[in-house]
Image: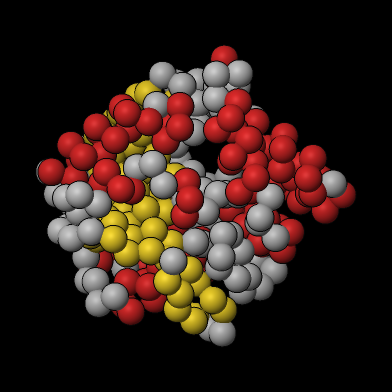
Amino acid sequence: MKQILYKNTQISYSDNGKGTTIVLLHGFLENQTMWQDLAPELSKKHRIITIDLLGHGESGCLGYVHSMEDNAEVVQAVLSKLRIRKAVFVGHSMGGYVALAFAELFPENIRGLVLQNSTSKADSEERKANRNRAIKAVKKDYTTFIRLAIGNLFNPDNREKFANEIEKVKLEALKTPLQGIVASLEGMKIRKDREVLLHLTPFPKMLILGKKDPVLNYEDALEQIENTAVKLVTLPDGHMSHIENKEELKTVLLEFFKGV
């Protein structure tokens, strides 16, 4: 892992391989380690950058709210340090929200965009209420909150099959500080609706959805790409496609990268 200092806050990242630059952005309660099975394969033909977003992994907290724009600025700081001008972005869940914020702030730096189990839509009022409940729950019982939150990301039919993997994800999530969790929940709650970017931006885009994603309703997620050129990939399982549908995900990503 390498580090830069951004606004007196340590940001951790990795940089491996050569070729077209691919930036992999993890989701909420995750960190760079979520890519440890995929990144080595992808780096055989591409330059792979992974970044710990604010308050996750080995990156510090910047404040009491980590907005998606704050995280996008962090990503830009890493890319500037590495003198990378254009990259393809793959964002899982919250990482997708950050990638969209980056696309809005730095459109000239985007070569392509993949939303993996993510959405361009803002939180509904119901989702905002759920975020508020989550903030109260994690403050009250940190460990129980994380253990329940991680288990609920998987297709229920897969929880036994991937019991070991789920345990590893929980152990990584438990490294996330309370402030990082709350600041991210606050940031996701106030994020802008960026569906317009799927319609108007010129770069190639792909949306990867899980048919049985417990977090992101499949039918609702489809609405955002109606009448767009966004490529849709539907995988059979839950929110954690890099675990539940790992081989299929690797195949579709490599195919997408060929086209950008």
- In the picture, measured across the screen, residue 63 lies left or right of residue 209, that is right
Which of the pair 149/67 is nearer the observer?
Answer: 149
Q: Residue furthest left?
A: 259
Which quadrant of the structure image shows residue 164?
top right
Q: Position of residue 172 (x, y in %)?
A: 61, 48
- In the picture, measured across the screen, residue 154 lies left or right of residue 246, that is right
Q: Is residue 158 above or below residue 94?
A: above
The colour style of the image is: secondary structure
Q: Is residue 223 above or below residue 196?
A: above
Q: Residue at x 29, y 75 (%)?
A: 82
- In the picture, measured across the screen, residue 4 lies left or right of residue 187, that is left
Residue 46 visible from this viewpoint: yes
Q: Residue at x 84, y 46 (%)?
A: 141
Q: Position of residue 179 (x, y in %)?
A: 72, 63
Q: Quadrant of the N terminus?
A: bottom left
Residue 111 visible from this viewpoint: no
Q: Position of residue 152 (x, y in %)?
A: 64, 30
Q: Residue at x 39, y 41 (%)?
A: 37
Q: Position of residue 45 (x, y in %)?
A: 16, 50
Which of the pair 54/226 is nearer the observer?
Answer: 54
Q: Is residue 10 above or below residue 165?
A: below
Q: Disc count in the image?
A: 0
Q: Residue at x 33, y 48 (%)?
A: 39
Which of the pair 169/230 is nearer the observer?
Answer: 169
- In the picture, measured across the screen, residue 188 lies left or right of residue 195, that is right
Q: Residue furthest top?
A: 157
Q: Residue furthest bottom?
A: 8
